[in-house]
Image: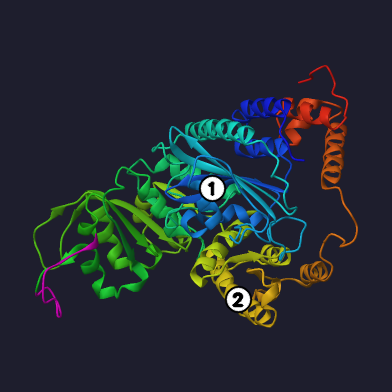
Amino acid sequence: MNQVSNNALLSFALDLASAVTQPNRFEQLVYAVRATINCDAVVLLANNNGVLTPLAQRGLSEDLMGRRFIIDEHPRLKAICSGHYPVRFPAESPLPDPYDGMVLGHDENLPVHSCMGVPLYLEGKLIGVVTLDSIMPGVFDNIDARALEIIGTMAAMTLNTAILMERLENQSLHAQNVLKVMGDQRIEMIGQSKAIQDLKQSINLVASSDFSILIEGETGVGKELVARALHEQSSRAEAPMVYVNCAAIPHHLIESELFGHVKGAFTGADRDRDGKFLLADGGTLLLDEIGELPLEVQGTLLRAIQNQEIQAVGKDQIRKVNVRIIAATNRHLETEVAENRFRADLFHRLSVFPMQVPALRDRQGDIALLAGFFAERFRRKLGLQQLILSASAIDMLEAYHWPGNVRELEHVISRAALFSRAESSKAESGKADNATGITVITSAHLTGLQIDNSAKEKIQKNELEPPRLEKHKPIDLRLETETYQRELIRKALENNDGNWTRAAQQLSMDRANLARLAKRLGIVVAKEVRI
């Protein structure tokens, strides 16, 4: 039975009290829930304008953290969010589970058999959800409803406090920055790597200023996304952001495109036309591919930026504008300056605050998240019930060097989704009675990826011999889990010479939480506390 005792609730409350002070506070909240209720997987999600965004999870494949769940498109999540009380779904529920096939250590085609959701409300507003899942049917049936309500209330208060603390630590211009419209795919940057976190901190630092920004990075890394984030977090967010692709404009029309022209100024100018500077007045002007701008136009652009004045082609009158400039390029402009292909004075005017967007190969741990993000997007577009990535597919994605960066990854996942849908449709047409509704992207669907032979052999071996449970061998999941936890704690203590404080830090836990877990597992807790 999966019941919650008073002692367990007390331990849960203590765990939550310490969770908000930890740097990994969202993970600590998930750990506290999992330590209180026995399950295979727990996910903590924040609600942002009808979109649930995972903040932390345990027990599911890592690409889950990149997925964004539109509540109205997922019947179980919609049912959880529709009321104020915990929802338990029967094992035979016909509603598709958003995590089907994603439980670690189990076959990708294995659906979740027990599902429970706890809505997190604060002052009448749904701020998030905790979901609990298990491959074993009926494991949540005997949990006292009142205990679940208490867990939900405490978790909601903790989540709210954790979000507030995260906002304060980020020192953003807008108080809503930490979870800023995460359902809006235009301005969200998916990733948890140090490289992307450093980039987000730079955006937070400079967004509120009117500094000119130079964004450099390889093709496909998301430079326009960074520019949009800068605009959306600035005081100009309500004004327009105007985009100019400097590489796509014919040389003889660039000045007209930027500054406008009057009727008759040149052949084909049959009417007055406002330029991009005037359209962006009061807002932001993004000059993309600035490195492609001809030298003869760079001087005119420099004067416009310096003086915030423009002169339409064919017009004597000068007009004042108030425009923030963000420039982007896949070239290294400092090298272009050294080789006399770009004006040094314009370079220094644009690069008041330079920003480098990291290549995907330098964003350790982000590939799976981005793959999950795109997989969920294409699941919606293709009308699939579930679209997941196999472990071998993720291994292959992480082994590739990604010369085309995030844009290339998006295209690879889109093709793979089509291939996997076609294969699933063919397979299910022959055995409709066994159809699970789970469409799996495998490494075979990832076309066009060239990886080294050693990585390819490792992936192929894993595909041939995937880690699965033996069908006829009974396994006590709780016992196996506790044995694994016991061994991890003992190794951490050995590595830190018996120092419980340092062992807790290595395990990303609060020392009090570690002591309680160790006591439950029968590990002797040292009385002294050594710092």
Neighbours of disc 2 within 10 Å: few (<14), some (14-19), many (20+): many
Q: Residue at x 26, y 69 (%)?
A: 254
Q: Which of 337 and 101 is in front in this view?
A: 101
Q: In this view, does 389 lie to the left or right of 118?
A: right
Q: Is 136 part of what is drawn in magenta?
A: no
Which percent across, then down, holds residue 113? 70, 56
Q: Is residue 436 left or right of residue 270?
A: right
Q: Nearer the viewer, residue 408 or 414?
A: 414
Q: Is residue 135 left or right of residue 128?
A: right
Which percent across, then down, holds residue 361? 62, 60
Q: Which residue is drawn at 44% across and 50% down?
A: 50
Label 1 to label 2, Cα distance in Å? 29 Å
Q: Quadrant of residue 257?
A: bottom left
Residue range in magenta is 264-276
Please, what secondary structure does the residue beneath circle 1 have? helix
Q: Residue 80 carries which label?
A: 1
Please, what secondary structure does the residue beneath circle 2 have? helix
Q: Is residue 110 visible?
A: yes
Q: Can residue 363 be seen in this view?
A: no
Chief SS of the magenta region: loop
Q: In this view, does 229 lie to the left or right of 2?
A: left
Which percent across, then down, holds residue 102? 68, 58
- In the rendered image of this protein, does residue 141 appear above or below residue 148? below
Q: Which mark is residue 416?
A: none
Q: Residue at x 29, y 46 (%)?
A: 236
